[in-house]
Amino acid sequence: MAAHKFYLSFGRHERYGNDTAIEREDMIAAYLTGKQLKSWLPTCTTVYCSPLERAAVTARFEALGLGVDHLLISESLTENADKFTVKRFITDLLNYTDEQTAYYHFVTHLPVVEKLGLPFLGAGEVCLLAAENKDEMQAENFLLQTIKKPIISAEIWQKLQLVPKELNTLSTEEIYKKLTDLNL
């Protein structure tokens, strides 16, 4: 990926939780997705997300993994946004992007991904677009890669000092704190 200099990644929100916005294990998986992207790509400037809670919570955990403090909510990324609105949002963002910015991440819904002409994404999956520069990205001259949702390994469970049954007793904030305190 070193030959490319500008990246956009579009992630689909994680699965609905019963008493949380997304499933608790998916909070950890979203964090791991962010860590994975951080290890491959330049510094992410901003994470954008839909205001719907399942997308916003997924984005918050992915942003934590990415090491991004700048999380912005956009109505243009809701599942009900029309194609023109979605494309205009991305176009405007790219038009106002400075030369130091090399990467943005988005967390949204399958209908938005489809409106952008990207491949089907399962819950928690990410579509990565890599281009030579932002002008090439706007011209849709990019390479595309689908990134599968990470599996939570036994090593991660050990580092968190948890078993899946104990995870179900924690709140979203408690899980976020555990991941914040964890230095992977």
Image (cartoon, rainbow, N blue to C red):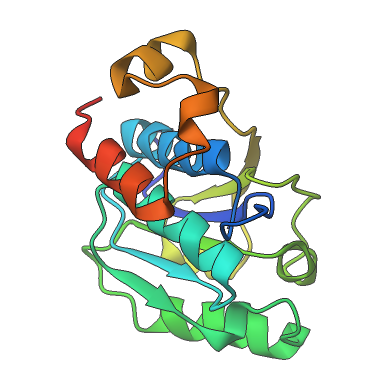
- How many numbered discs? 0
Is 73 drawn above or below residue 101 in the view shown? Answer: below
**Can residue 68 be seen here?**
yes
Is 84 drawn above or below residue 120 in the view shown? Answer: below
Is 170 drawn above or below residue 112 in the view shown? Answer: above
Q: x, y percentage for residue 173? A: 34, 54
Q: Is residue 25 left or right of residue 182?
A: right
Front-most of residues 136 and 184: 184
- The quadrant of the picture occupied by the N terminus is top left
Q: x, y percentage for residue 74? A: 50, 83
Residue at screen point 27% across, 68% down: 70
- The quadrant of the picture occupied by the C terminus is top left
Is 53 drawn above or below residue 65 in the view shown? Answer: below
Q: x, y percentage for residue 123? A: 70, 47
**Can residue 105 be seen here?**
no
Residue at screen point 69% across, 65% down: 109
Front-most of residues 144 and 24: 24
